[in-house]
Image (cartoon, rainbow, N blue to C red):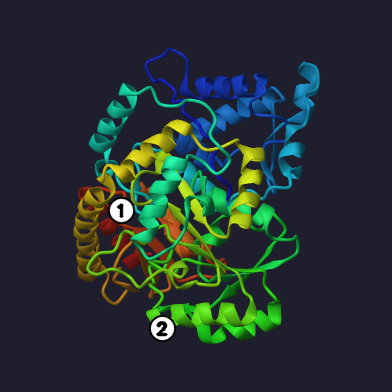
């Protein structure tokens, strides 16, 4: 499945120029400006028709015109590509950027992930897979007050020290202490979200050709932070209580991993919460074997009825755990503020690499985040968000019960964003993904989180409005029941 190009041009039927000719000239302009380069594959005729909002015969006429001018080549086995020969006949030959694109060492996103990333910003889409808060749940009014206060005292606009703003690290240290995690400001690094933290860890702490244990399914399979660094990921089984710790020592003996990555609280995508017993067993195994643990705590603040068990880091007297936190899920993805807490030597190593990549997260965002904590906004906001998420979760569970009983089964999340839905009637998630997208509903197939998964989809109740949730689930139910 090839991700779609970003096409924001729609031919105008009121112009005297035929629609197919407008499309042909648009594509020709992209080629002549060097934006669409020789060797680049075009989307299918059906995908182009959807992008330009015309019928397929119009696209065929446009492509025929481009082919007659030598600008595209059509190979029925390999699709339609921008022609190299056509360019050579018209102008100075272009540099073959397609070879560069295919040669870079950083892994591309999975095709489905690229399609999701591009489709999320369509105005006509219902986002049933998006893992972020809806715009109405973002704390706009609170941040308006914060930025008003910052404006009165002329905030720093320069670079900050390698670990990040000391005021913010002090505030995060206090925030972590409330969770029984002892981390001084010197043992905390400010990052631009959890993803950057994982990239820094992969580059700075893990040797090439080493291995990492990871829950399966896991969010980590949907990105390539570790694979691009030459690190092998080994999936471990999970159930509703999280990682099967009884299997851990066998996996350690067989694979000699450098690290275990886990989301113990409201796991992405399954929503599972690792039990208190298994958390203790995991720490004991780490102490017995010397296994380092990377704990992703992104969703832990978003509990519904009762607080989850203490984090792994709170049980870690021997400093086996690196603890990642972020404001992206519970507060604002646009703030781009996260952190890593761990031994100071590790934090200094990661900070040195960070300075080589971006020279520090936004100083203005860090000042705002420090006030977010110190002015008491965080707890007030979380109470509001939890109430809204509970309401939306209950709505989706009710819709699923009324429309998909017997055709699917699902968890009842106790926090976080996600419902891990298992299809029981033979519908393939990838097929459902494509059919739903064609009807304006975007979801996440389970193969993103486990490439062998042919049963699950991940639903998020966090982003879509309640009206959109109802429309989206009803569309989903129809597509599942009538494949």
Q: Secondary structure at mark 2?
A: helix
Q: Residue at x 30, y 64 (%)?
A: 415
Between 23 and 226, the one nearer to me in the picture: 226
Query: Circle 1 is placed at which residue position?
Result: 462
Which residue is rendered at x = 76% and y = 23% of the image?
A: 87
Q: Residue 421 placed where, x, y %?
A: 37, 68
What's the residue at 42%, 63% (across, down)?
181
x, y percent for residue 31: 65, 24
Closer-to-camera residue (457/278): 278
Give the mark count: 2
Which of pointers 1 and 2 lies earlier in the amino acid sequence? 2
Residue 334 image-quadrant placement: top left
Location of mark 2 (residue): 277
- Residue 52 in percent (x, y) is at 46, 31
Quick check: 5 above or below 173?
above
Tag nearer the camera, 1 or 2: 2
Q: Is residue 252 left or right of residue 309?
A: right
Residue 331 falls left or right of residue 183: left
Q: Nearer the viewer, residue 306 or 474?
A: 306
Task: Please identify the quadrant where the C terminus is shown.
Answer: bottom left
Q: Can you see residue 458?
A: yes
Q: Quadrant of residue 432?
A: bottom left
Q: Which mark is residue 132?
A: none
Residue at horizontal 54 percent and vertical 30 percent from the top: 159
The Cα–Cα distance between marks 1 and 2, rounded to whole angstroms, is 29 Å
Q: Is residue 128 left or right of residue 165?
A: left
In the orientation shown, which residue stands out farthest toward the top? 16
Look at the numbered disc 1 and give the secondary structure of its residue: loop
Q: Report which quarter residue 174 is drawn in.
A: bottom left
């Amino acid at each position: 499945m090839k991700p779609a190009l970003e096409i924001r041009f729609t031919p105008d039927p009121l112009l005297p120029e035929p629609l197919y000719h407008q499309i042909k000239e648009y594509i020709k302009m992209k080629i002549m400006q060097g934006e669409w380069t020789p060797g680049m594959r075009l989307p299918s005729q059906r995908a182009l028709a959807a992008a330009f909002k015309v019928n397929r015969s119009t696209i065929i006429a446009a492509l025929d015109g481009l082919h007659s001018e030598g600008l595209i080549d059509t190979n029925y086995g390999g699709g339609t590509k921008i022609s190299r020969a056509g360019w050579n006949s018209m102008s100075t030959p272009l540099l073959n950027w397609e070879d560069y694109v295919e040669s870079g060492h950083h892994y591309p996103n999975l095709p489905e992930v690229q399609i999701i990333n591009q489709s999320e910003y369509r105005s006509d889409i219902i986002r049933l897979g998006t893992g972020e808060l809806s715009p109405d749940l973002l704390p706009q009014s609170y941040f308006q007050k914060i930025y008003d206060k910052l404006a009165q005292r002329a905030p720093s606009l320069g670079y900050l020290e390698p670990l990040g703003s000391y005021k913010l690290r002090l505030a995060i240290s206090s925030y972590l202490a409330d969770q029984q995690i002892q981390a001084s400001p010197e043992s905390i690094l400010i990052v631009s979200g959890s993803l950057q933290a994982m990239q820094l860890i992969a580059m700075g702490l893990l040797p090439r050709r080493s291995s990492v244990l990871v829950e399966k399914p896991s969010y980590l399979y949907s990105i390539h932070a570790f694979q691009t660094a030459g690190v092998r990921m080994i999936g471990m089984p999970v159930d509703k209580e999280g990682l099967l710790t009884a299997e851990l020592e066998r996996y350690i003996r067989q694979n000699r991993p450098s690290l275990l990555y886990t989301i113990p609280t409201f796991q992405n995508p399954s929503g599972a919460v690792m039990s208190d017993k298994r958390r203790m067993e995991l720490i004991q195994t780490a102490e017995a074997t010397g296994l380092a643990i990377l704990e992703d705590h992104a969703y832990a603040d978003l509990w519904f009825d009762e607080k989850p068990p203490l984090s792994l880091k709170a049980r870690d007297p021997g400093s086996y755990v690196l603890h990642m936190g972020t404001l992206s899920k519970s507060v604002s993805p646009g703030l781009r503020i996260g952190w890593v807490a761990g031994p100071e030597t590790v934090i200094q190593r990661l900070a040195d690499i960070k300075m080589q990549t971006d020279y520090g997260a936004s100083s203005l965002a860090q000042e705002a985040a420090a006030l977010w904590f110190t002015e008491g906004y965080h707890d007030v906001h979380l109470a509001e968000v939890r109430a809204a998420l509970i309401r939306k979760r209950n709505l989706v569970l009710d819709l699923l019960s009324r429309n998909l009983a017997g055709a699917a089964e699902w968890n009842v999340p106790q926090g976080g964003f996600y419902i891990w839905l298992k299809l029981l009637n033979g519908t393939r998630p990838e097929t459902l993904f494509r059919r739903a997208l064609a009807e304006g509903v975007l979801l996440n197939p389970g193969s993103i989180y486990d490439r062998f998964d042919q049963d699950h989809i991940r639903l998020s109740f966090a982003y879509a409005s309640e009206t959109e949730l109802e429309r989206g689930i009803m569309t989903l139910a129809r597509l599942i029941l009538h494949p």
